[in-house]
Every structure is written in C-alpha cells, then in structure tokens.
Image (cartoon, grey):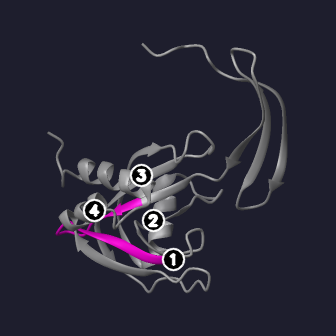
Amino acid sequence: ELAQGGKWRVTGSRYVHKDRWIAVRADDCVTEDGVSVAPYYVLEYPDWVEIVALDADDNLLLVRQYRHGIADFSIELPAGGMDPSDADPCTAAARELLEETGCAGDMVWVGDARPNASTHANRAHIVLARNVVRVAAPKNDPTERIEPFWVPAAEALRMALAGELDVGMHVGSLLRGLAHAGVVTMT
C-alpha cells in the first residue's frame, strides 16, 4: 500500500530565473519528519508534445538534430513545446509536425507522462499521428536544423531497445504510441 502522507510543506518560494523558455523556482520545504530541504529547485517548463507519427504502412517518422545539452546529435520523435495559443495537445502536435517535418496526419491524444517528476513541473503529451504524409517543406528555422527520416516501426523499436534512440521520454512515448496504434502488443 502506498503511503498517503509524506508531502512536503513549502514555507517559502521564490523565482531564481524566469523567461519564456523556463522558470527556476526555489522552494524552502520541510518534510513530514521536520527535516528542512532548502532550497529545492523546481523547473517550470511549458507542457510539450511528443509525436508518434506513422504513415499508412506503419513506418515511423524520426528526426535527427543537434542538441546543445549533449553537444551532439540525437535521434528523436518529432516534438516541441506547447504554445499558449494551442487549443490542446493535438493542435500543438499538428503544428510541430508540420513545422519540423512538413508532414501532417490524423492526430489522437494517447496520454501524458512526467518528464522528471523530481524536478520538472510540466507534462509531456503523447500524440499518435496516423496516415502521415508530407504536405509542405519544413519550416526554415536557423536554430533547428532537423533531418526527418522514416524507419519501419519494428526498426524504431529495435533502435529504442538498443539505445540508438536514447532520449528517455521519447522511448516511453514511442512504446505507448506504438501500443496504442496496435503496432506492438504487450503480452
């Protein structure tokens, strides 16, 4: 049985940094046992979407792009932050998919996940895009040079299990999206 108590009490809170990309909040906390944990940093990002994009033959659309946090290239699902103007995760996913890859499809919200519950306050929404086709050129963004490419869904699963697709949130979203699509089954 899970403990029902144990929440920390916040005795003070302040923003250390806040801009359009991230807010860093420093909370002064006291545990259930009276232990002070101060400061405890919480990262407030906007929610974002991760898109499991499948064409009519169940090929998966992946992207390769430079990620400065690791100073290297990463293979990922198409993804991006939700804008305040986005009506819902499917709207955000359609916009991001079109901007990053020039593709469009039928969007279905699969669910959400917590990127890192210990320090991140936001949610990552998993959106399945079916019958995805290229409808335009990707948006030219000089801060994002994205190379989209297709692989069979089984190959994407192999890549995730082999660590070639290694962004943890994307691996989880891939598994949930493929299971929701019926492309992989859990026995």
Q: Residue 132 in the image: state x and y as whole percent.
A: 30, 70
Q: Which one is closest to the eye, mark 4 or mark 2?
A: 4
Q: Residues within 10 Å of mark 1 (few under 14, many from 20)?
A: few
Q: Are marks 2 and 1 in contact (CB under 8 Å)?
A: no
Kindly identify which residue carries mark 3: 126
| Residue 58 forms part of the magenta stretch | yes
Residue type at the position of mark 2? Ala
Instruction: Find residue 72 and name its label.
Output: 1
Tell me which segment is drawn in magenta. 51-65
Q: Residues within 10 Å of mark 4 (few under 14, many from 20)?
A: few
Q: Are marks 3 and 1 in contact (CB under 8 Å)?
A: no
Q: Nearer the viewer, residue 68 or 152?
A: 68
- Gap between marks 3 and 4 measured at Cα: 22 Å
- Gap between marks 4 and 2 measured at Cα: 29 Å
Kindly identify which residue carries mark 4: 162
Query: Residue visible at 42% across and 84% down?
Result: 136
**Quadrant where the image shows the N terminus:** top left
Instruction: Find residue 94 and name its label.
Output: 2
- Gap between marks 2 and 1 measured at Cα: 27 Å
Q: Which one is closest to the eye, mark 2 or mark 1?
A: 1
Q: Which one is closest to the eye, mark 3 or mark 4?
A: 4
Q: Earlier in the sequence, mark 3 or mark 1?
A: 1
Q: Residues within 10 Å of mark 3 (few under 14, many from 20)?
A: many
Classify residue 175 as left or right of residue 9: left
Check the image and report above or below for 100 versus 129: below
Q: Are marks 3 and 2 in contact (CB under 8 Å)?
A: no
Classify residue 28 as left or right of residue 43: right
- Gap between marks 1 and 4 measured at Cα: 18 Å
Residue type at the position of mark 4? Ala
- Gap between marks 3 and 1 measured at Cα: 25 Å
Q: Are marks 1 and 4 in contact (CB under 8 Å)?
A: no
